[in-house]
Image (tube, rainbow, N blue to C red):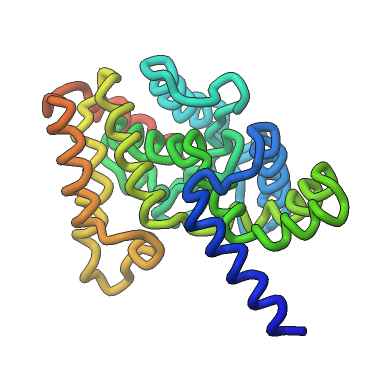
Amino acid sequence: MKHYFVALFLSLSSLGCASLGKSVNFFSLEDDVILGKQADAQLKADARYKFLKPTDKNYDAITRYVNRIKDKLLQANDIPHERQFNYTVQVIDDDVINAFATAGGYVYLYTGIMKFLDNEAQLAGVLAHELAHVARRHGSNQMAVKGITHAILAETLKGKSEAIQALAGIGYQLAMLSYSREDENEADESGALWMSRTDYNPYESQAFFKKIREMKNASNPPEFLSTHPNPDSRVVNIERVLRSLNAKNEGNTYEREYREFKKLLP
Ligand SMILES: [Zn+2]
């Protein structure tokens, strides 16, 4: 019995890789929104994630600031699925130096990463990267790759809408999954491109990785280093993209505004 399932999984996943490649994602845009919403509700129900709440001090100012950066990126670019996805940035109060995104428009920033960065352009670079994961649908794509047996079996047995319901039940896994190296590179590349069309200095997209690699030898290296590809290669890759775009190493960083913003953080 066990062997049968293993064999089935192998044949389905190799089929997915060989003949479908990246288009293996069978989720619709609406499914992405459902999955993202589900993951968001599950994250909020989990006490380990201390979401900044409307009753918290400076909630409005902090939320407005990060969403204004997101809006600036959206306005300067033709970011995919802007009409279908409600791109929103939420803040989690924790010293973790990281950010993440699920599906359907949900982006999360830890206060830790905001304190770690030095200017607004650097934070915009991080947001551009996370928006790219959402827009390029890396979340549901990974789900499709990892959950393909479940989905195909459920679809066959119950029909598509119920299969999606079952998958929405594992929205939490969507929030927790790590993207592939290929996804990370694509998010870096789209992020750099989108930054180059704003008034921010696009080379600040590299800053996060430059700063993080300085911490490699620290006694307590950030979680990011264990869950993401080598920061050196990412700095090089972003450099390559910006050079190919003839992007100038100039533009606004809004360092002074950012220093004021950081004072608002809990
Ligand atoms: Zn990423």
Q: Using residue 151 as the reference point, say whether residue 49 is left or right of it.
A: left
Residue 25 locus on image (x, y percent): 58, 45
Q: Quadrant of the N terminus?
A: bottom right
Residue 259 visible, this orientation: no
> As drawn, is 143 to the left or to the right of 35?
left
**169 or 210, nearer to the observer:** 169
Q: Position of residue 100 (x, y in %)?
A: 49, 48
Q: Relative to residue 11, is residue 113 depicted above or below?
A: above
Residue depicted at 32% across the width and 60% down the height: 229
Residues 107 and 65: in front is 107
Identify the residue shown where x is 61% and y is 35%.
104
Q: Position of residue 227 (x, y in %)?
A: 40, 63
Residue most extreme to the top = 75
Q: Residue at x 28, y 74 (%)?
A: 219
Q: Determine the residue located farthest toward the right in the rendered image.
A: 158
Q: Is residue 48 above or below residue 241?
A: below
Q: Residue 154 or 174: which is nearer the viewer? A: 154
Picture coordinates of residue 56, whole percent (x, y): 61, 38
* The quadrant where residue 146 appears: bottom right
Left/right placement of residue 31 relative to residue 109 reads: right
- 121 sits left or right of 10 in the view: left
Which residue is at a point 81% across and 47% down the rendered structure image?
Answer: 165
